Amino acid sequence: MPPTHSASTYTMLRQGIDDAAFTSTEHQLHLASTLGSHPKWRLQTSNGTAEFITRQGTIVTATVHPLGIMDGTMWTWAWADSRIRDDRAEAARQVRDFGHSRDNAMLARASYPLTPQRTRITPEQLVAMSKNVHRIWRHFVFPLDNSTRLYAAIHLPTLELPEPSTASIRQTITTAHRLFPITRFRRAAVSYARLRGITHQENRDHTHIRLMPSNGTVELSWVDFPRLDGVGLECTPQWDTKQHDQQARRQSPQRPGRHRRLATQPSGSHDGADGRADAGQGSGAGSRQG
């Protein structure tokens, strides 16, 4: 019999998605603008790292924290998958322990199918909300074969997220609204402002928030439906990295040493060119940027 999940389980997951949606999206936009639409990568399973070629042709190295594997329609958390070493699955174990403490079966159970008929959560949403727990805000989807994908949080110490600006905030909110089923915009906006250190003000009835980065203000309201600077937000699927593309050109990440091309994969590695750096995508305290 397939596993069943209670209404409280989904309520907690939806709240987690609200908490993470904007911050996760901003990091993913920046990552996508840095790596381009068809990232080239090499996954080193021996040391738990991955190398990526940026749009400028430099190589950046990320520490890979496996979260889960999607094999066909079956999701398995990294801590329960025999293909992943125990010492690589700490982030996934943090999510499991959080799930146990909150009695949330989808975070604590080892594996289950993720299909529209059986669940209302996608792998991308599951990964995004888990960022509230392990606090590594970037992730990447590594295709391992035709039906198997590794979802992993990635820590890139040389890739710094620029300070929030009015343009990047607008792009982040617009994109997140198109990608995630945000149910409480006030919760999402306040969480984003706190995680990114953005000064913000709310009106008395909590139907309007003003985000104030260093270069201006952004107005977000949600009386009847969400509005950004007075304009209603649309839900048309779209992936737009224009603002972050401009920032990436100004702040291309550098790696010491000579630039080199990725060689043919040795034993214990996987090469690829079509991984995904898009936003999938319990609250903790503080923000750890990956």
Image (cartoon, grey):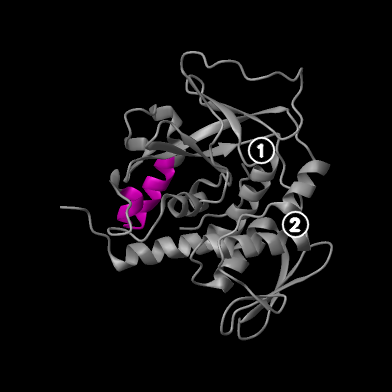
Majority SS type along the magenta span: helix
Mark 1 or 2, nearer chain start:
1
Per the image, the residue denoted by label 1 is 35
Residue shown at the point (40%, 51%) measured from the top left: 98
State the image coordinates of residue 62 (x, y, percent, origin top left). Answer: 60, 31
State the image coordinates of residue 243 (x, y, percent, origin top left). Answer: 75, 54
Residue shown at the point (58%, 61%) measured from the top left: 176
**Which quadrant of the structure image shows residue 194?**
bottom right
Pick the residue in front: 44 or 91. Answer: 44
- Say which amino acid is labelled 1: Leu
Q: Answer above or below: position of 171 versus 263.
A: below
Element under label 1?
helix
Per the image, the residue denoted by label 2 is 164
Q: Distance between the residues labelled 1 and 2?
A: 20 Å
State the image coordinates of residue 270 (x, y, percent, origin top left). Answer: 49, 24
Q: Give the range drawn in magenta.
A: 92-108
Residue shown at the point (61%, 81%) measured from the top left: 206
Q: Answer above or below: position of 148 versus 103.
A: above
